[in-house]
Amino acid sequence: MSHRDGIAIMLLNAPRKNVVRLARAGAVFLVAALVICAAATPSLSEGGLAPHLSTNPGPANTLGGQSSADYWRQIRQGQSFTLVNPQMGPPVLVQSEGQDWRIFRNETIKRYGGYLILAMLAATILFAALRGRVRIEGGRSGRTIPRFSQTERTIHWFVAAVFIMLGVSGLVLLFGRTILVPVIGKTAHGALASAMLQGHNLLGPLFIIGILAMAVVYFKDNLPRSADIAWFFKGGPLFKWHVPSWKYNAGEKIWFWSAVIGGIALSGSGILMEFPWLAQNLQQLQLATIVHGIAATIVIGFAVGHIYLGTIGVEGALEGMTQGQVDENWAQEHHHLWADAASDGPSAASETAPAE
Amino acid sequence: MSLIWFVEQPLWYLSATVFVVGVLWRLFALVALGKKEDLSVARGSAGGGAVRAVLLHFIPHGGFFSKTFFHFLAGYAFHLGLFVLLLFAAPHVTFIDERILGVGWTPLPRWAFILTAEIAFAGLIFLWARRISDPVQRQISDADDHAGTWLTFIAMLTGCLALQESNDALRIIHMLSVEVWLIYFPFSRLMHAFTWVLSRGNMGAVFGRRGVTP
């Protein structure tokens, strides 16, 4: 199995109104594409346009006529041989730890990574069920405060768009054999996986640029402050009361740092996987796939919560990222310390029509 | 009749015909609109003004350039990237050779194709992100703008997803998305790929006749 076989990653995201309609249209197209892919592949095969699998039974007696235990034991103990390209260090016929890597990558990461994403999904649904939509208690004031600059918004949506595509393609690559093969069959899954791998490798470099730009632009306001501790002790978003916070509360800061650190881990490991000649030995490549899988499932898990809270979970939150402005009452309730500072600043607040 | 035959034969010819006839019809209709005769004394050449406008406005001057620098950069990245992919991607060169012109040219090497695709995607995604997050652009964007963006994006993406060239289903999906794009093109703002010359030239001619460099 190639080291590229198991590239993994993340996400989901969803804006509102036009964006929601567009996302819906995109989703319909993708589903249609998937259906066509699933429907067309067998028909092509039947029609003779795709190669049929060989029914040749292959060479006989491949196991040999006698026990090869000593032979294989010698190989598994590190029997070396000569390779044309010694770039990866001393060549070894069978790298035994590769079996451990394969099991860890294909079983442990898939199982617990899947559990993590499902757990985050369940926690989000539970939160939504118990807490409901977090409304602006004081209602909309009709006055808005600038929250995100055009640069911040553009970078956010750029990263979000790339993250969604990498997330979907990565999840197909990581879980496709387990989840999709029983549904759409091996042939259609093969076509889909091929497509996802190409897309994943193509868009990966854009994510690296985006996440680095995001880290720089959002860095200052995500540094820890003393108010973050109080936010935690008072239960963050779990209860009805609002805990004062600066521009970002502690939960948002955890998401930011998870995305940045996870993004850097994904980027570094992804570079090694896409350009394997940069690795100094095989173990680095194996480590890269493991880091990539773990970081991807963690970031995707966090992203589930972020997407919910940033869109439908908290009334008034999304418009900060779509229009750049938030309602003054929203700001006072969710980010009291920041709202006070912003209101004191020159032209910080502006009289505008009530946001939708 | 197989799906791939349908997509690569009748549907391809239908969409290509709609594209060519539609574009020519729209351009003819625009030119046929004509202009009111300008009775003022000409202080300069209208033709020269048109040519100057078409060429000079490739580079923005004055105005809000510093505020729109990244938009400018993304616009060029996307459009140049798209045209390079369209004309120099190896599968496209083969397609043009075998199905359209009967002549081909040297295609891009694979690494250059990947790099160009990444530049084009970066530009398009950046422009889309700005379109949905800039209050002014949100206001002036309608369904046609979004549809054109999405169709272009999907055509590009499905092409790149089929890069391995190992599966006919992926090629069908790419061909289908391109055919939808071709049919939509003449009836949408995607026509700006052709009308920008007329628009810019017309404005340049008006200014040029008045002796003003557009």
Image (spheres, coloured by chain):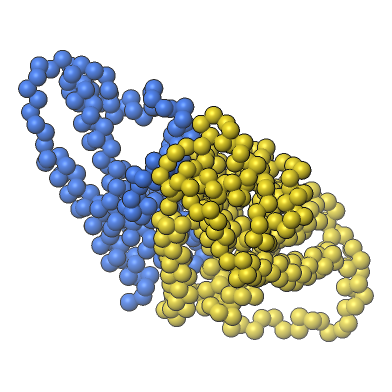
Chain colours: A yellow, B blue
Asked which quadrant contains residue A23, the reply is bottom left
Looking at the image, residue A196 sits to the left or right of residue A103; the answer is left
Q: Is residue A315 left or right of residue A87?
A: left
Residue A259, given in percent of the width and then of the height, sits at: 67, 51
Looking at the image, can residue B166 be seen?
yes
Residue at x 59% of width, y 80% of height: A182
Residue A197 x, y percent position in the rendering = 58, 60
As displayed, is residue A203 above or below residue B60?
Answer: below
Q: From where the camera sits, is residue A161 visible?
A: no
| Observer-nearest of A311 and A226 | A226
Does residue B160 appear to the left or right of A274 in the view shown?
left
Identify which residue is drawn at 73% across, 58% down. A235
Vertical relation: B194 (above or below) B168: above
Q: Is residue B75 above or below residue B154?
A: above
Quadrant where the N terminus of chain A sits is: bottom right
Q: Is residue B44 left or right of residue A34?
A: left
Q: Quadrant of residue A211?
A: top right
